[in-house]
Image (cartoon, rainbow, N blue to C red):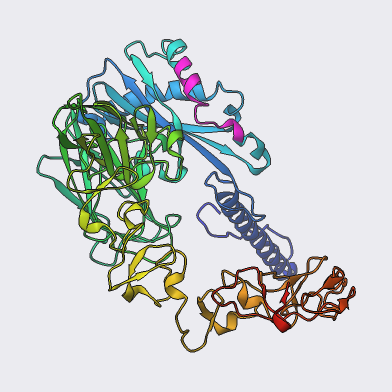
Amino acid sequence: MNDGRVHETFLPVSGAGHVKRRKKGCRVAVIVVAVLVTLAILAAVAGILYWYFTELPNGKSSRHGDRMAVRVYSGHLSLANIPYSSAYEDPESAEFKNLAQKLEQVINSSCKTVPEISPYFVRSRVFDYSDAPNMLVYYFARFDIPPEDSEVLVKFTEDALTGPLREAVRDQGRALGLEDITIIAVSSSLANPDLVMTPEERDCHYTLHASDRGERFTSPGFNKDGYPNNIHCQWVLRAERNHVIYLEFLDFNTDDDCGNDFVMVHDSLSPAEDDVITKKCGKRPSSNHLSVLSSGSVMLVTLLSDENERYKGFSAVFSQRPKVTECGTTLTAISGNFTTPYYPAFYPPNLDCTWTIKVPAHLKIRLKFEMLRMEETGVKHGACTKDYVEVGGERYCGDHSIINLWIDRPEVEIKFHSDESHTDKGFVGQYKAYDPRNPCPGEYTCRSGLCIALSLRCDGWNDCGDLSDELQCNCEPDQFTCDNGICKPKLWTCDRVNDCGDHSDEKACECPKDFWKCQDGICIPTDQECDGKMDCADGSDEAVCGDKSSICTDFNFKCADGSCVHKANAECDGRQDCEDGSDEASCERQVVPGRDRELGRGMCPKKQAWNLQPGHDSSGLGPGEDGAVTG
């Protein structure tokens, strides 16, 4: 079957009378053999396909739902004595291959020396180079862990490979024939396996060089049918030494779900998690371009898509800018501004800045940060450890529209720090010196110390942020006075919005058709009355519903067993409404003023349901028969 066809061979026989029978038997035998061989081939192919989709280390699901776990480390080696040339940008050049082969020996050796993870080591590759103060060599090392060994995944920590790799460089470099190569630095961290590509796998890979004026590139299919499904594209952006790369996305339109399609930008040619500048998906308006900067002369842009709907993609422009070598300054004017580098573009990774503000000794400093956006959104500002701005020993990070600080001295130091990954827009800082004897000349001084225009006082808007500009106001004729004393425009009353904060602007309003009015004046849809849920803030929608419910409010009686009676004045009305009788159990002997008849236990007079009027308190007490007060 070497040529792909089945050959029949007949053995010589004696006797012509038996030839026909034997030929027929041989043909049957050969056909059987052919069928068996064909089935064997199909079985082999099926086995290969099964292995490819279940056992091949690509993370695909197996027949039983198990997954082959993949862990990839990526980073770079810094070489001190190898001059960089453009030949290292060509994977087919002799320079690229020779150096890669030598360094892969070091990486392979180190991967095999870690007992916890070495049994799962598959391969390592050197896949790119870049120029810096020293040449950087980018590599990855891949480990595949079968489902039955999933307990070892905890061993694949962020720095599991860094130490052994450094030891291999120090102790084994000479033994591996690296006398002519000096490795002075090593980095290694976990990377997304989907982002790792070898030179031969780069079917959608571009190397672009920056210029001062800017160069443009787009995703495949941009302004046509959009980028293809299941695409994996990478753009390597390079700038001259001592420059950084400024990248701006002019158009951006991908799937809203970053689990399907996304664009990721790395501050390195290594797709390691530690080098991620940003990961974005969805659609951005043309008025809000996404722009980022690198910390060095290279940047990696990756586009990944799945098999779902196709999207337009992106159009981007990038250029090189001189690298910032000094960040921060001393500010001595009475007022001024300062920003994170390159604002409103994303600030670069690995950056530290210090600003010192000095004003005359008799003054103090008012400091404001507008649109502060840094990593660690949702982290309490004192716990910032990655990117932050520090003022007087206090750190601020996350996402804030405004931060106001008052410095009780004429000098302050502001420090800004970004780590090696995940940057953002940063901030605009503003400062102004003020005289503590008159902190806001010609303006209104908020309780917090903030200064606002006098015209903003008592205008219905919380301009101070602490409502101090809206308290103790004399409302104008065209304003509504809330129960809490705040003034709001009359146009805002009865709009079903709690503008006052205490619902008083919505209390004296008629409810529209198909709406029910709560006791506090708020309108709710009719079908929410007596639905077993407290839709009114005061619970009045569940107060008198004619049956028992688990919802207890101030308008009904809670039995001792925890159930609630939806009946007005169920307690001591002479009828047992609770199954445990607790509504009639505490009706002690009472003497009602104005009567000469004693009421015995269980004979309390029936309560009336009162609509509270001015002069009545919220306890529910009201006038009884003959002027008596019942409670």
Q: Nearer the viewer, residue 131 or 8?
A: 131
Q: Nearer the viewer, residue 364 or 156?
A: 364
Q: Quadrant of the N terminus?
A: bottom right
275 displayed left or right of 339: right
Give the quadrant of residue 349: top left
- Kindly identify the residue that appears in the image at 20 percent across and 30 percent down: 86
One can see residue 4 in this view = yes
543 displayed left or right of 275: right
Q: Nearer the viewer, residue 372 or 105?
A: 372
The correct choice, above or below, for 77 with respect to 366 in the image is above
- Counting from the top left corner in percent of width and height, residue 239 is at 19, 35
Q: Outermost residue toward the left? A: 213
**Magenta-drawn segment:** 154-167
One can see residue 304 in this view = no
Q: Nearer the viewer, residue 220 or 412?
A: 412
- Counting from the top left corner in percent of width and height, residue 150 is at 64, 39
- Counting from the top left corner in percent of width and height, residue 365 is at 24, 33
- Counting from the top left corner in percent of width and height, residue 410 is at 24, 26
* Residue 187 shown in magenta: no
The correct choice, above or below, for 222 with respect to 303 in the image is below
- Kindly identify the residue that appears in the image at 27 percent across and 69 percent down: 476
Q: Quadrant of the C terminus?
A: bottom right
- Kindly identify the residue that appears in the image at 28 percent across and 16 percent down: 80
